[in-house]
Amino acid sequence: MKCEIEQIGGSLVVKLGGEIDQHCAEEIRGDIDRELDIKKSSSLIIDLGDVEFMDSSGLGLIMGRYKKMAGRGGTIMLARPKPNVDRLLEMSGIKKLIGRNKTKE
Amino acid sequence: MRNYMKLEIPSKSVNEAFARAAVGAFAAQTDLDINELADIKTSVSEAVTNSIIHGYRDAEGVVYIECEIKAGKNCVVSVTVRDEGTGIANVERAMEPLFTTAPDEERSGMGFTVMQSFMDTLDVVSEKGKGTTVKMSKYIHSREGGGEII
Ligand SMILES: Nc1ncnc2c1ncn2[C@@H]1O[C@H](COP(=O)(O)OP(=O)(O)O)[C@@H](O)[C@H]1O
Ligand SMILES: [Mg+2]
């Protein structure tokens, strides 16, 4: 699992990689939430480009961050999911909920 | 031809990655494509994770995983994940999309829905206090020229 976090302008950009499951979801959640609270970011961009595997624990992680951002009037964006991850996002209806960018500016 | 494997792991979350990789590697002897492989691995991850975090919530236990392959024209990969944990009081309700008994842990409630949509059959047998058995299978559609080395 990889989780690199960088604040760019008002956005917190989180680059995830490797395999996202229940075993590592809590650590990722902690890392992201800590930075969000420090940086007070108005938008969260989750770059899924290097994620090779994700199960519904990843959906829980994304839904949780969506609620957190929505609660403070911010936005969340998902970028570059690989086909297998994209099918999971599609199936869950999460994409309709939050909208998505295929390419990150 | 029929082939099978059995696997036993303690309910440690670090074993989730191993379990899905092991089943994936075993299933790879069929003619399956990368999407079918991803579907099986994701579904195994869901079932094993459920046994670990819901089934054996309070104590460590053993998760039993079996994978069976029926090769040939009507190729099927079946996976059974079983635990002797808490069991599910109402299976029908548990299988509804978004239903979870652990929302504070940010569970999405989508595990059974994932298994249902990524596999071709899903069968859940559970008894409160006794444990849960999840049996699922996927039909592998053989492709033109599949299995040939060119
Ligand atoms: N092996 C199991 N043992 C006990 N309860 C389970 C098991 N699998 C699933 N459940 C119950 O079914 C619910 C729904 O499971 P699932 O769809 O995977 O969602 P989630 O895991 O996100 O809660 C769980 O919240 C739990 O209450
Ligand atoms: Mg689950």
Image (cartoon, grey):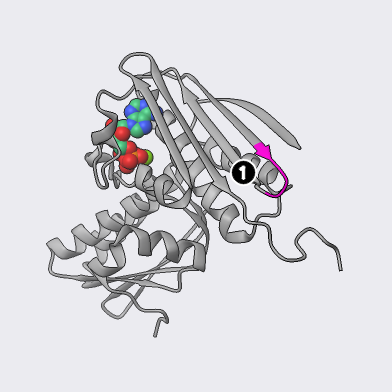
User: Which quadrant of the frame does ligand 1 lie within?
Assistant: top left
Image coords of residue B99 (percent x, y): 24, 41
Q: Quadrant of residue B9?
A: top right
Any part of residue A4 in sight? no
Asked which secondary structure carries label 1, the reply is strand
Tell whether B91 sits left or right of B140: left
Front residue of this view, candidates A73 and B93: B93
Quick one: A20 or B77, which is closer to the camera? B77
User: Label 1 lies in what chain?
Assistant: B
Q: Residue at 40% of width from left, 31% of height from top? A: B124
Q: Which residue appears at 65% of the width and 47% of the height?
A: B74
Residue at the farthest bottom position: A105
Q: Main secondary structure of the magenta part?
A: loop
> What range is drawn magenta here?
B69-73
Which quadrant is the C terminus of chain A positioned in?
bottom left
Q: Is residue A3 above or below residue B44?
A: below
Residue drawn at 30 percent across, 17 percent down: B128
A49 within the magenta span: no
Which residue sits furthest top? B129
| Pointer 1 residue | B76
In the rendered view, tell whether residue A81 sits above or below residue B86: below
Residue density around tag 1, few if under 14, some if 14–19, many if 20 or more, within 10 Å? many
Q: Percent x, y for residue A5?
A: 40, 65
For image coordinates 31% across by 50% down, the residue present is A60
Q: Position of residue B64 (x, y in %)?
A: 55, 24
Please state if B145 lies on the left or on the right of B36 as rendered. Answer: right
Q: Nearer the viewer, residue A62 or B111?
A: B111
